[in-house]
């Protein structure tokens, strides 16, 4: 578990660095987006990963690694938007990073609990399976959004976002530490 903890923390640093730099460049313009629009942004990223995995090549610069980072960051934005709601107003940088860190840490705690129960089964999975699972979670999320957030027995939108974060982190761990496993 210690290895996973260190690797997960390394991925947190990578994603946080990108999020922080993009916030410098764009501010919190994403605050105007409804959660359903963020779900669609995650879909675009995951679909592109699947396309690259299937075709074996891409025609634009961003690679699979970049797209997984985008999924993590958009999913955290989605959770923030579920809590705060969309807004035309810029959000304070420190407050934004505080919420970002809070939700990334919650995702990590969820991963640790599931890793305990599943004995890190994800380590035997292919990166392409994480892509497919993220796409499935997106489809579930869209269905819940279409039902105005109401479910009969299933977890809500936030739980699906947390799972998307962790599947993307697993993909990133596999990409970043492929030779360390």
Image: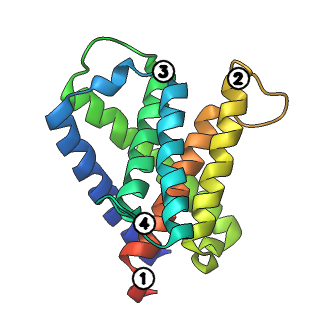
Nearer-the-camera pick, 26 or 97: 26
Helix, strand or loop at mark 2: helix
Identify the residue shown where x is 34% and y is 27%: 30
**In the image, is 173 to the left or to the right of 18?**
right
How far across and how far down the image is residue 178, in percent?
A: 42, 82
Are dots 2 and 4 in contact, CB under 8 Å? no
Pointer 3 residue:
34
The image quarter in which residue 111 lies = bottom right
Identify the residue shown where x is 61% and y is 73%: 120
- The residue positioned farthest toward the front in the image shown: 59
Pointer 2 residue:
146
Sequence-wise first label, 2 or 1 = 2
* Neighbourhood count class around disc 3 (C-alpha, 10 Å): few under 14, some 14–19, many 20 upward: some
Sequence-wise first label, 3 or 4 = 3
Helix, strand or loop at mark 3: loop
Q: Report the disc number at residue 172.
A: 4
Q: Which of marks 2 and 4 is in front?
A: 2
Identify the residue shown where x is 42% and y is 40%: 74
Are dots 3 and 1 in contact, CB under 8 Å? no
Sequence-wise first label, 2 or 3 = 3
**In the rendered image, the vertical position of residue 135 relative to residue 7, given as above or below:** above
Q: Report the disc number at residue 178.
A: 1
Sequence-wise first label, 4 or 1 = 4
């Amino acid at each position: 578990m210690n290895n996973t903890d260190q690797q997960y923390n390394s991925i947190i640093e990578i994603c946080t660095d990108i999020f922080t730099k993009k916030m410098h460049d764009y501010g919190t313009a994403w605050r105007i987006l409804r959660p359903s629009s963020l779900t669609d942004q995650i879909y675009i990223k995951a679909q592109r990963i699947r396309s690259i995995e299937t075709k074996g090549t891409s025609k634009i610069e961003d690679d699979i690694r970049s797209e997984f980072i985008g999924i993590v960051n958009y999913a955290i934005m989605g959770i923030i938007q579920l809590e705060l709601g969309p807004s035309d107003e810029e959000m304070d940088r420190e407050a934004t990073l505080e919420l970002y860190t809070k939700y990334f840490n919650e995702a990590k705690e969820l991963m640790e609990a599931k890793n305990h129960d599943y004995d890190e089964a994800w380590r035997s999975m292919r990166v392409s399976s994480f892509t497919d699972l993220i796409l499935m979670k997106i489809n579930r999320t869209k269905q819940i959004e279409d039902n105005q957030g109401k479910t009969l027995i299933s977890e809500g939108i936030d739980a699906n976002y947390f799972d998307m974060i962790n599947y993307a982190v697993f993909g990133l761990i596999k990409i970043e530490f492929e030779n360390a496993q």
